[in-house]
């Protein structure tokens, strides 16, 4: 069994550490932020500071795919989330029966457990702290990698890290889970290695979000799916923990005319324009408008031109690849990635460093990279669609997958079977081809969705939106 260092105590780092420790490895988590969470949900929300995570108090929602993975691998984390006030829900219990056709056998696959990000992370940290083989060290900054010359020409072999103060921590394997802001690529270069391949661009989205609290313990009724698309923007409505929920506008960073949404009065006025979500703002706000922009799509690969750029180190979750978070896939992809690493280490140990890096690259490219690419493609199309909305044009593309995606979304508003296929895709329970494999389903999607309105739910036009913001 190996001595492993996990860099980063976010959700993916904590899950990775627990999975590896429960397989018999000795795991130390190094986290640069000083403070630990404590065990009170409200204190965590109001007072726990995580400056290393810029989206810490932004909207979060855990998909059914994440819940399924956690139920199988780390069920005590789900139990702890619920103990901290997390919410159990199923979209087919939330939506009106007229839309869903009523609850059916098999709908339990859409069950999930969710909460605000600080509460989720606090729950995972509480379980990690009592997991045999896991040690968490907070307030520790990794300044560089400790390396020697590996078997691969020009590729350094990582044998640990150097932390602030100069102390050296040795490891058989270092796992980068420091998230979308990871600096490990620069550290590899500083150690004399080749920089990992990186694709990087601004995702192009801006979020204007608020959190609310119920006065009577009831959350708003769902009149549509959690993510709804409208003319020139989208809206998220996300149940959270302890009778709270979040609502967010998602706009294009290039759309300067809607930047007034950062003002609470303009934000509230705009929300009233959308009948399927307006009532989510009829409660006590517990935050002002929280704005997050400059979110980058990033993808890193540690095997370049067929050769590893480093051995003794791998990256998981957002430290490997990250996208616009509105689809909520980051935690699910991160958990899939962590499970893949755990499974690989059962067959290939850190004592085979080159083979380990090559095999993890192959597994990453075959299992989670397609999910990243699919998410990135959706984001680019949606941004282009918003840009067309802003200019009053209709977005056109030759990409048949986007046309099918639009048809599936529109048809889901009218057919319970199509709705289940659509929710299966957005929940990451299956791919679009798998969701549409049922006999006759593609025909129904095309019949109901091809000539449907661009935005099926009632919504304001562009002039009305700008008037409300002004």
Image (spheres, rainbow, N blue to C red):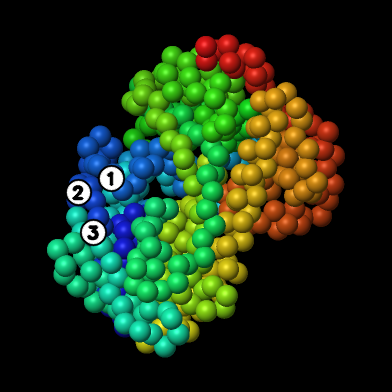
Quick one: label 3, few (<14), some, or many (20+) residues within 10 Å? some
Residue drawn at (57%, 56%) of the image:
372
Q: Is residue 359 visible?
A: no
Q: Tag 1 or tag 3, which sits nearer the N-term?
A: 1
For marks 3 and 1, give the one nearer the viewer.
Answer: 3
Q: Residue under circle 2? A: 35
Percent coordinates x, y for residue 93 in the rendering: 55, 38
For marks 3 and 2, give the one nearer the viewer.
Answer: 3
| Closer to us: 37 or 76 | 37
Q: Residue under circle 1? A: 50
Residue 430 falls left or right of residue 264: right
Q: Tag 2 or tag 3, which sits nearer the N-term?
A: 2
Q: Residue under circle 3? A: 141
Q: Quadrant of residue 235?
A: top right
| Closer to us: 375 or 281 | 375
Percent coordinates x, y for residue 461 in the rendering: 67, 18
Q: Is residue 173 above or below residue 420?
A: below
Residue drawn at (28%, 45%) of the image:
50
């Amino acid at each position: 069994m190996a001595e492993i260092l996990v860099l980063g105590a976010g959700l993916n780092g904590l899950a990775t550490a627990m999975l590896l420790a429960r397989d018999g490895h000795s795991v130390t988590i190094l986290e640069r932020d000083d403070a630990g969470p404590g065990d009170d949900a409200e204190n965590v929300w109001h007072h726990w500071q995580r400056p290393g995570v810029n989206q810490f108090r932004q909207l979060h929602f855990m998909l059914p795919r994440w819940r399924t993975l956690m139920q199988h691998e780390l069920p005590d984390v789900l139990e702890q989330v619920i103990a901290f006030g997390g919410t159990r829900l199923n979209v087919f219990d939330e939506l009106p029966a007229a839309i869903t056709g009523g609850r059916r056998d098999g709908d339990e696959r859409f069950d999930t457990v969710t909460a605000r990000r600080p509460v989720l992370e606090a729950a995972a940290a509480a379980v990690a702290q009592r997991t045999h083989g896991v040690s968490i060290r907070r307030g520790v900054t990794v300044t560089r990698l400790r390396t020697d010359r590996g078997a691969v020409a020009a590729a350094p072999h990582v044998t640990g890290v150097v932390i602030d103060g100069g102390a050296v921590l040795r490891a058989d394997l270092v796992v980068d889970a420091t998230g979308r802001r990871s600096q490990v690529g620069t550290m590899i270069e500083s150690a004399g290695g080749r920089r990992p391949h990186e694709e990087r661009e601004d995702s192009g989205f801006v979020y204007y979000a608020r959190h609310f609290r119920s006065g009577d313990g009831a959350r708003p009724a769902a009149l549509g799916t959690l993510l709804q698309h409208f003319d020139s923007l989208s809206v998220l409505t996300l149940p959270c923990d302890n009778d709270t929920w979040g609502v967010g506008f998602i706009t294009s960073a290039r759309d300067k005319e809607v930047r007034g949404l950062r003002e609470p009065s303009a934000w509230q006025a705009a929300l009233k324009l959308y009948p399927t979500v307006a009532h989510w703002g009829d409660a006590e706000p517990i935050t002002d408008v929280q704005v997050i922009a400059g979110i980058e799509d990033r993808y890193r690969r540690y095997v370049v031109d067929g050769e590893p750029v480093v051995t003794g180190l791998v990256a998981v979750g957002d430290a490997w690849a990250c996208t616009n978070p509105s689809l909520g896939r980051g935690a699910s992809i991160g958990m899939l990635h962590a499970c893949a690493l755990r499974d690989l280490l059962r067959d290939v140990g850190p004592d085979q460093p080159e083979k380990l890096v090559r095999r993890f690259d192959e597994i990453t490219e075959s299992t989670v990279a397609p999910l990243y690419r699919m998410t990135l493609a959706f984001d680019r199309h949606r941004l282009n669609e918003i840009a067309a909305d802003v200019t009053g044009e209709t977005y056109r593309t030759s990409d048949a997958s986007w046309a099918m995606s639009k048809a599936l979304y529109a048809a889901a508003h009218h057919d319970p079977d199509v709705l289940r296929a659509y929710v299966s895709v957005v929940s990451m329970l299956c791919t679009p081809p798998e969701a549409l494999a049922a006999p006759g389903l593609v025909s129904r999607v095309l019949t109901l969705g091809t000539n449907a309105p661009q935005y099926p739910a009632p919504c304001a036009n562009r002039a009305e939106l700008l008037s409300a913001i002004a």
